[in-house]
Image: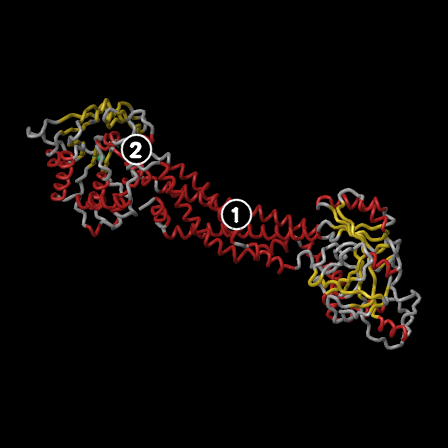
């Protein structure tokens, strides 16, 4: 269960203040698969980074399972990111000189999981995102964009987080592989009760989620639930 | 993949830069180690010199030394006075005798060479020119030095006649304790000491070469002035001159000289090195400047020690400076690396890496670089420390080396010149080669290990600052490209 209360993130640019996230409030039940759509620069990544405790809001609060992130000390926030959050970055943000396997094992290492268990689980995750086994030990900077994206997804799943925040997880994937990733995510929310919030431009992906949000000029609005006629995307 | 493995991997991420950093570090570390080794070597040398200067003062009659000079002889009463001076732990009296081979003395007398105005077979003047005959033959050939020295010995009246080959006298010293004429403990190779040194016994200690020359062993007998002595032990003084000598008890020597209660020198031991100077002054005034000369064994060693001490300080400063440089290099490199990997550090934080893990990763990476630098640096140091040490010593102690050079002729006493000179001990330095030997000895694994430990300590401090800087990087950095 995640509650977002009057969240604001303001940036100063010159003498102007912009608010990509301006008084956003919503709630997500545990196990929900939700999506956010919106124009480029509308503040989707900014909102996600606030939910993932990568950034601190100008005002407002995020409450995860009854615990408020506002006022939480940095050490606790680190622990929150390590244990409860799986973040798929828009830019992947993998460690370039490490192998795919090592990248997926990193969060598990920080969580103190034994080495043999780490590599076992990392291999399984890489298989789940359909990365060729012979590419498991290849260095990240020798993988294609789509391959890197899948490694980033596998890394986000490593510590079995309660909340997965995925910023354009299928942006670099072909239709078929994208479908597979969507399948993987919805099975996680269904079978493992994982809450998943996906930022996407992909209509078909958005249409498969339980709840759909639109971010526009810092304001979040919810679109009608599934099976109702979809509002045409403005993109 | 562990933190350590990641650190090692990161250290080699940019191989060209790693090589450059290691090279620069190696120079600094090599210099630091070389300076440490030089410092230790010089320190060891200073200690050795201080130990050899020792705490011994020598008292000679005023105006005389050895068999030369004039003045009034020392007496047993003066020995008692000396023993009463504060900080004096022991006073050993000696009585020196000059022995000539009986057969040769007779031959020379027959050749009419002994009747000089100076009188007798003795040298000029002198408080203790007691020359006696013995059955022993000197172990040292006269050589050209000996002939020159002996020719001046009261033979002014001889001209024209072909002079027979001369031999050297043998020094017999009566000693009040089992020490040599400079106060050093005698090193007995065979047999025993003389037992009671205060008794007029018929036992003697012979230098190894003297005993060999005369085919004497422990238990053999020989005569001095027709009195028979038994060889009680053989000693090795370490020098040719020192081994052409024999020791009897002090009363025995005084009886032979028919001068009871008279001393040639007194060897005064002071309780500690710091008190040597003050005790010397006190002793001088207690005995009276007109009665006795108090000298410190090897006075000019002090200049050597003080200039070596300054070399020691220079090398210490250089060691610390080089160490600081190594630390600074690490600091700057790590600051650069942290700045460069800001985004990556942000990623690690974003996926939940604790600050200490990231800090540790950077410190370990710095240590990998230092370890490589140390290996290369230790190799540089092992080649360079010898020449650095000798360069340091020769450049800053030029005057001392000159002093050592002047001591050369004094050391020639070993070749049979003036008895009573300082027996050969080696110069203050014994030359650069000896220092190099001690440098090599000081470049022990222990010293190198201590130096490398210091380097690692400084490197940890140097790496800690940038490692702590990583704690201030916010995870949001990952969302913003540089
Ligand atoms: N650190 C910052 N300082 C100033 N402005 C910022 C900062 N970060 C983001 N912004 C601005 O906030 C707005 C929202 O950016 P954000 O990255 O959230 O957009 P987005 O919706 O994810 O866009 P896209 O779909 O292109 O990824 C942009 O106008 C951006 O310029
Ligand atoms: Mg974005």
Q: Identify the secondary structure beneath mark 1.
A: helix
The chain letter for the residue carrying disc 2 is: A
Image position of B127 (left or right of B386): right
Q: Residue at x 86, y 46 (%)?
A: B288
How many marks overall?
2
Image position of B302 (left or right of B112): left
Image position of A170 (left or right of B217): left
Pick the quarter of the image with the C terminus of chain B: top left
- Above or below, B436 against B279 in this view is below
Residue A25 visible here? yes
Q: Identify the secondary structure beneath mark 2.
A: helix
Q: Where is residue B237 drawn, in percent x and y?
A: 71, 61
Circles 2 and 1 on the same chain = no
Nearer to me, A180 or A107: A107
Nearer to me, A186 or A221: A186
Could you say which quadrant of the image residue B88 lies in? top right
- Above or below, B5 against B227 in this view is above
Report crowding for label 1: few under 14, some 14 to 19, many 20 or more residues within 10 A (C-alpha). many
Q: Where is residue B391 drawn, in percent x and y?
A: 60, 56
Report crowding for label 2: few under 14, some 14 to 19, many 20 or more residues within 10 A (C-alpha). some
Q: Where is residue B254 drawn, in percent x and y?
A: 85, 58
Residue B336 circle label: none
Depth check, mark 2 against mark 1: the one in front is: 2
Q: Write down the residue under mark 1.
A: B322
Q: Write down the residue under mark 2.
A: A79
Q: Residue at x 40, y 36 (%)?
A: B469
Q: Residue at x 80, y 50 (%)?
A: B294
Image position of A144 (left or right of B220): left
Instruction: Assess whether mark 1 and mark 2 are in contact (beta carbons under 8 angstroms).
Output: no
Could you say which quadrant of the image residue B213 lies in? bottom right
């Amino acid at each position: 269960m995640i509650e977002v209360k009057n969240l604001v993130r303001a940036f100063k640019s010159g003498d102007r203040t912009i608010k990509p996230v301006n008084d956003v409030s919503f709630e997500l039940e545990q196990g929900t698969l939700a999506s956010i759509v919106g124009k480029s620069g509308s503040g989707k990544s900014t909102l996600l980074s606030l939910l993932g405790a990568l950034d601190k809001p100008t005002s407002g609060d995020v409450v995860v399972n009854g615990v408020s992130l506002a006022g939480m000390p940095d050490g606790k926030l680190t622990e929150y990111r390590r244990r409860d959050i799986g973040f798929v970055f828009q830019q992947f943000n993998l460690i370039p000189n490490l192998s795919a396997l090592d990248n997926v094992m990193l969060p598990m290492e920080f969580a103190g999981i034994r080495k043999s268990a780490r590599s076992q689980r990392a291999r399984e995750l890489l298989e789940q995102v359909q990365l060729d086994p012979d590419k498991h030990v290849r260095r990240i900077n020798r993988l294609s964009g789509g391959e890197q994206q899948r490694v980033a997804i596998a890394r986000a799943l490593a510590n079995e987080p309660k909340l997965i925040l995925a910023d354009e997880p299928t942006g670099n994937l072909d239709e078929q592989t994208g479908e597979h990733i969507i399948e993987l995510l919805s099975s996680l929310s269904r079978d493992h009760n994982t809450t998943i919030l996906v930022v996407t431009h992909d209509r078909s992906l958005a249409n498969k989620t339980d709840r759909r949000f639109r971010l526009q000029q810092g304001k979040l609005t919810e679109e009608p639930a599934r099976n109702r006629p979809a509002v045409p995307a403005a993109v | 993949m562990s933190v350590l493995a990641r650190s090692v991997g990161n250290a080699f991420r940019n191989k060209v830069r790693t090589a450059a950093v290691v090279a620069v570090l190696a120079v600094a570390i090599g210099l630091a180690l070389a300076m440490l080794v030089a410092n230790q070597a010089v320190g060891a040398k200073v200690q050795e010199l201080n130990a050899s200067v020792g705490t011994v003062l020598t008292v000679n009659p005023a105006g005389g030394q050895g068999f030369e000079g004039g003045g009034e002889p020392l007496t047993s009463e003066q020995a008692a006075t000396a023993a009463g001076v504060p900080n004096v732990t022991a006073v050993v009296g000696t009585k020196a005798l000059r022995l000539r081979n009986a057969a040769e003395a007779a031959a020379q007398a027959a050749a009419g060479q002994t009747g000089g105005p100076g009188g007798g077979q003795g040298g000029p003047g002198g408080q203790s020119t007691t020359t006696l005959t013995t059955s022993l033959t000197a172990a040292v050939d006269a050589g050209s030095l000996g002939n020159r020295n002996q020719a001046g010995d009261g033979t002014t009246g001889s001209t024209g006649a072909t002079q027979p080959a001369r031999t050297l006298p043998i020094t017999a010293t009566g000693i009040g304790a089992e020490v040599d004429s400079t106060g050093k403990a005698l090193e007995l190779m065979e047999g025993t000491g003389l037992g009671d040194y205060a008794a007029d016994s018929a036992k003697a200690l012979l230098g190894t070469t003297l005993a060999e020359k005369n085919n004497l062993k422990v238990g053999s007998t020989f005569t001095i002035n027709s009195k028979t002595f038994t060889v009680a032990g053989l000693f090795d003084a370490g020098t040719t001159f020192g081994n052409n000598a024999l020791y009897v008890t002090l009363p025995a020597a005084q009886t032979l000289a028919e001068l009871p209660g008279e001393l040639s020198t007194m060897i005064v031991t002071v309780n500690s090195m710091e008190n040597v100077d003050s005790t010397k002054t006190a002793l001088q005034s207690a005995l009276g400047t007109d009665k006795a000369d108090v000298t410190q064994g090897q006075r000019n060693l002090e200049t050597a020690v003080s200039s070596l001490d300054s070399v020691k300080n220079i090398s210490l400063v250089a060691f610390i400076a080089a160490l600081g440089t190594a630390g600074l290099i690490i600091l700057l490199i790590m600051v650069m690396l942290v700045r460069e990997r800001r985004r990556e550090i942000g990623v690690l934080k974003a996926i939940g890496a604790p600050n200490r893990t990231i800090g540790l990763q950077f410190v370990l990476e710095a240590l990998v670089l230092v370890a490589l630098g140390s290996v290369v640096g230790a190799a540089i140091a092992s080649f360079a420390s010898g020449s650095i040490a000798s360069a340091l010593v020769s450049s800053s102690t030029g005057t001392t080396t000159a002093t050592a050079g002047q001591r050369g002729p004094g050391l020639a006493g070993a070749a049979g010149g003036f008895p009573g000179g300082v027996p050969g001990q080696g110069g203050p330095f014994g030359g650069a080669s000896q220092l190099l030997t001690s440098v090599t000895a000081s470049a022990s694994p222990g010293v190198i290990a201590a130096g490398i430990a210091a380097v690692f300590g400084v490197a940890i401090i140097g790496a800690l600052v940038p490692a702590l800087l990583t704690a201030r990087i916010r995870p949001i950095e990952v969302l913003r490209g540089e």
